[in-house]
Image: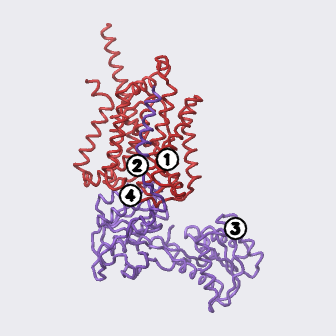
């Protein structure tokens, strides 16, 4: 008897839902059934940047050292702009935890939300509600679906990174000689596309005397990268530069070279984190390496948000605005704003960076 | 009547009303219709899962696998959608799969006589693991707008859904023999058995209902965030248990009321919403929720022991 009574509940739920099951909407039939982009007003490049805007930063998660540097840059920019800075965020980087925070920011009537989306789609309905409430949405780090934000701060283009790697290799090799690449995994998308650009660069006349002898893979594993660096130097005794476009690889290669007789003879360069690379830069193993400056990402995002909110730009391709010390920027396709070439770190400037 | 007023669930209801009134008065932007919508949407998964959870805790058991069941159905919803099934088929299918997940819990607990805490901690890991097997780290997001809008476009649809479910569960718990048998089981399962209540069978169906509701919430969650993901709803089980206990349901079973639980859920959600509007950080929010929970377990015990002492003293005095 109890069985029947309790069974009524799921049965009723099923029945209600089944009744709705008459039509049949499938993936194919609903194709194209997605949120449309907002059509914005036209930009006024001469509009003055407003003061006192409320700019809120919503990173993926709070208390992450890299993120702290990013939003720190945003704080500097809001101070320059005489705007109000606010930092909120969830304790966990789950897909849905950001939504409550976006809703709160809508209620608080912020002017700009700068967000690194944990899930490009989960935040979409809320972000579009924010935009309907005249809040400008700028994404950084990881983009939201492009139909639900006004601009995206892209930290670096593939071309920018690849060119910078080739340039540093040429400098470190002193204009000629053998170089090798120590990458992450053989199928790492980012690294492979950077190496492709690097190879295209190396084919140019000014790189004619530089010879790429090998691309080795350390699988972004410290020990494997260390061994691969060792192997490279044994196989190619004339090697002048190891280029590691991965933070794990460059640190391992620098550790090996710095503790071997190759120190000073073989240069290590690539993409690395200043805190990991500081000792190798100070002891002379590494002269120069690069990475985008996370503080500039937050800084640019704040300026882009202020420009959007003041009507200087609408996020359309070709809109121009000035981002304080970083200079003039042009909005690219799909509202993308590219930060620019990566920052180069040397013994002179490395102590200014802490991330 | 005075006893009724002093009971924990009436205290919590009064407290909830007080928080709502005070927050509307002193927190900017709290009492707006848009914020009401946001709160209803935040309430929805908690409240729906808390309904069957209340039944289960009243019988002295627990179901910690609810959030993982939610994640599993969310994952499967995405996978089915990618396979080209129609959404009208997927939704009942997901509820059914939730019910099956609940039935497995029910079988292990009542059929094999295993403790529900151990079983549902196990299936908490198991169902979440399966969810990741189905969808990995990916997400499926292209659900039809007409369905996602049904959830996100305002409070009405969800509010009606919550009210209907709360009414059904409330009536079953407080106005039917089934409901009374749940309290009997929670108070003393053996006595209930001898009173002719089919303890095992009742518990089994409670887990099936809990699974089915979790499956439905998995669907609603997916539509709300237009994102089917394996990690959806992670940690929700603890929030639900917290709300149920806060609402005055005894973790040892046999005690508690659904209005108290509803108030507990509203209290937690409203408090978090208001504090967030006041820019209280996430960590501090956790502290508030945690402290509230500890108090909700502690206070009734303190009140009881004080009352006990007082009665004993009176008895002693009258004996002298």
> Residue A254 placed where, x, y %?
65, 72
The residue where tag 1 is placed is: B94
Callout 3 environment at 10 Å: few (<14), some (14 to 19), or many (20+)? Answer: many
Q: Nearer the viewer, residue B62 or A171?
A: B62
Q: Nearer the viewer, residue B53 or A309?
A: B53
Could you give the CA–CA distance between mark 4 and mark 2, rounded to whole angstroms? 13 Å
Chain letter of the residue carrying label 1: B
Q: Secondary structure at mark 1?
A: helix
Image location of residue A166, percent across then percent down: 61, 82
Image quadrant holding the C terminus of chain B, namely top left
Earlier sequence position, callout 1 versus callout 4: 1
Q: Quadrant of residue B288?
A: top left
**Residue A94 versus residue A265 in the image, above or below:** above
**Residue at image coords 37%, 28%:** B302
Chain A hue?
purple
Label located before the other in sequence (2 or 3): 2
CA separation, marks 1 and 4?
A: 19 Å
- Quarter of the rendering occupied by the N terminus of chain B: top left
Distance from Cα at disc 4 to Cα at disc 3: 54 Å
Question: Residue A226 shows which numbered tag?
Answer: 3
In which chain is the residue bearing label 3? A
Query: In the structure shown, which secondary structural element does the residue marked by tag 3 occupy?
Result: helix
Q: Which residue is mark 4?
A: B146
Q: Which chain is red?
A: B
Looking at the rendered structure, whether the residues under marks 1 and 2 are on a common chain is answered as: no
Nearer the observer, disc 1 or disc 2?
2
């Amino acid at each position: 008897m109890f069985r029947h009574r309790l069974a009524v509940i799921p049965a009723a739920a099923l029945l209600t839902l089944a009744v709705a099951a008459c039509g049949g909407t499938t993936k194919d039939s609903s194709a194209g059934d997605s949120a449309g982009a907002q059509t914005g007003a036209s930009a006024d490049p001469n509009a003055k940047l407003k003061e006192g805007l409320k700019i809120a930063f919503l990173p993926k998660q709070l208390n992450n050292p890299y993120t702290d540097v990013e939003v720190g840059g945003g704080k500097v920019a809001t101070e320059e702009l005489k705007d109000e800075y606010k930092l909120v965020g969830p304790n966990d980087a789950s897909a849905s935890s950001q939504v409550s925070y976006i809703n709160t920011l809508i209620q608080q009537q912020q002017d700009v939300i700068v967000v690194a989306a944990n899930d490009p789609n989960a935040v979409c309905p809320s972000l579009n509600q924010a935009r309907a409430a005249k809040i400008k949405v700028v994404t950084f780090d990881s983009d939201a679906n492009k139909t639900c934000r006004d601009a995206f701060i892209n930290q670096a283009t593939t071309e920018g990174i690849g060119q910078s790697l080739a340039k540093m290799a040429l400098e470190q090799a002193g204009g000629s000689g053998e170089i090798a690449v120590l990458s992450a995994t053989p199928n790492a998308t980012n690294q492979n596309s950077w190496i492709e650009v690097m190879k295209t660069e190396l084919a140019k006349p000014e790189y004619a005397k530089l010879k790429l002898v090998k691309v080795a893979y350390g699988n972004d594993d410290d020990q494997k990268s260390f061994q691969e660096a060792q192997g490279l130097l044994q196989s190619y005794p004339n090697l002048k530069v190891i280029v590691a476009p991965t933070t794990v690889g460059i640190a391992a290669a620098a550790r090996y070279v710095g503790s071997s007789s190759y120190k000073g003879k073989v240069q290590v360069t690539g993409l690395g984190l200043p805190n990991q690379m500081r000792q190798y830069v100070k002891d002379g193993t590494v002269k120069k390496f690069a990475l985008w400056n996370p503080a500039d990402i937050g800084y640019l995002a704040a300026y882009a948000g202020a420009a959007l909110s003041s009507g200087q730009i609408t996020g359309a391709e070709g809109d121009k605005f000035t981002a304080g010390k970083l200079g003039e920027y042009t909005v690219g396709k799909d509202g993308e704003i590219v930060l620019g070439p990566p920052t180069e770190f040397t013994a002179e400037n490395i102590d200014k960076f802490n991330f | 009547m005075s006893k009724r007023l002093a009971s924990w669930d009436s205290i919590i209801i009064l407290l909830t009303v007080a928080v709502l009134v005070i927050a509307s008065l002193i927190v900017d932007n709290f009492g707006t219709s848009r914020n009401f919508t946001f709160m209803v949407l935040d309430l929805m998964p908690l409240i729906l899962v808390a309904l069957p959870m209340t039944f289960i805790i009243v019988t002295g058991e627990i179901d910690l696998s609810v959030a993982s069941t939610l994640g599993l159905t969310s994952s499967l919803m995405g996978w089915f959608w990618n396979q080209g099934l129609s959404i009208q088929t997927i939704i009942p299918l997901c509820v059914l799969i939730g019910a099956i997940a609940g039935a497995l819990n029910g079988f292990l607990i009542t059929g094999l006589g295993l403790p529900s805490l151990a079983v549902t901690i196990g299936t908490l890991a198991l169902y979440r693991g399966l969810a990741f097997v189905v969808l990995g780290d990916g997400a499926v997001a292209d659900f039809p707008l007409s369905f996602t809008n049904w959830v996100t476009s305002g409070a009405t649809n969800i509010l009606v859904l919550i009210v209907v479910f709360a009414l059904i569960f409330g009536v079953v718990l407080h106005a039917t023999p089934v409901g009374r048998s749940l309290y009997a089981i929670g108070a003393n399962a053996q006595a209930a058995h001898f009173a002719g209540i089919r303890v095992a069978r009742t518990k089994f169906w409670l887990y099936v209902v809990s699974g089915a509701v979790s499956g439905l919430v998995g669907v609603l969650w997916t539509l709300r965030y237009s994102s089917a993901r394996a990690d959806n709803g992670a940690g929700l089980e603890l929030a639900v248990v917290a709300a149920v206990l806060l609402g005055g349901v005894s973790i040892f079973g046999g005690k508690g009321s659904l209005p108290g639980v509803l108030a507990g859920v509203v209290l937690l959600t409203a408090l978090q919403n208001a504090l967030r509007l006041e820019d209280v950080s996430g960590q501090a929010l956790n502290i508030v929720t945690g402290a509230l929970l500890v108090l909700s377990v502690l206070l009734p015990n303190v009140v009881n022991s004080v009352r006990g002492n007082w009665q004993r003293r009176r008895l002693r005095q009258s004996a002298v």
